[in-house]
Image (spheres, rainbow, N blue to C red):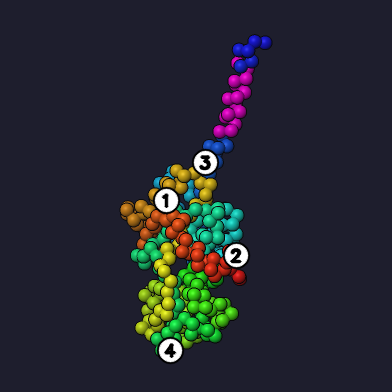
Amino acid sequence: MDRRRVLTRALPFVCLAGSALVAPALQAAEEPLVMGIFPRNKPAETTTMYTPLANLLSERLGRKVILATARDFESFSRSVQEGRYDIVFYNQFQYIQSSRSYVVIAHNEEFGRSAVAGALYVRKDSGITQVSQLRGRTIIFGGGRDAMLSYIAPRFLLMQAGLNEEDFKSEFAVNPPNAVVALSLKQADAAGGGEILIDLAAVKKTINTDDIRILASTESLLFLPWAVKRTMPARLRGAIQSVMVDLDGSEAGRAVLKSALTTGIRKAQEKDYDPHRRMINAVFGKGAPPR
């Protein structure tokens, strides 16, 4: 058999093999993107708030985006750890913990602000003027131990003043506004939360915020991040980021922002979360927060 005949017979096999390899790749490229939203709201509320964003992303990307909700933080965190989400919106601590698998592309702008400091609050009539005076006192935090502004940042302030966890009594409110309300009702000596708490309309309607003041605050910390899988192709990552940061540039996009109760989504990169990372490492070391 001469050389030309061997090549003629071999070529169809090579072409078929190539087709077999390309087909799965094309099929995979058409699979829907899963967008996970952390459960700071009830699943039904989350669906209402973020379905418009999933729909707009689907339209602009030319690829289906499926919204995934979680019934609680435990199931959401498990899904993040298992890499079930292609796009994910979560708190700053959760991003830092998952940053080997996910890369930040954007952050929420809330109340017209891109960043806010963590703070410790006291009543003006408490006589407390220094953080060190909270030794032996009761502090109520506005969220769980993985809440960046309501627990980790205030804990960082306490550590800066030489107070470790055993030096005060910790209580936890359902959410940040409730922590300030509890402080106002003298159910605690101090409260931890973002510096904007006493400016919130819901808080002002419930208590006289003139009775509350900030005892200490951290540097401003960028708001909640949006991240994508690190394995996502750069072009797709850039397209998702572009759609998100341009939302306030169109009527349809502004409707999406209104539905999500946010004032904008802005670009972000990994170094923007270095201050959060330093505080997290100071409070927990490199481990997860105790439950």
For the residue pair 65 and 267, the one nearer the viewer reads as: 267
Identified at 67% across, 10% down, the residue is: 1
Estimate the x, y position of residue 71 in percent, counting from the top left. 56, 64
Give the residue at mark 1: 241
**Residue bearing the label numbered 3:** 29
Amino acid under disc 4:
Gly
Residue numbers of the magenta segment: 8-22
Give the mark nearer the N terminus: 2 vs 3: 3
* Label 4: which secondary element: loop
Q: Is residue 10 left or right of residue 248?
A: right
Query: Which residue is disc 2 drawn over?
Result: 287
Q: 10 Å neighbourhood of mark 3: few (<14), some, or many (≥20)?
A: few
Q: Which of label 4 and label 3 is nearer to you?
A: 4
> According to the image, label 4 marks what residue?
127
Q: Do the residues bearing badges 2 and 1 touch, measured as CB atoms within 8 Å?
A: no
154 relative to 6 in the view: left or right: left
Figure quadrant of the C terminus: bottom right
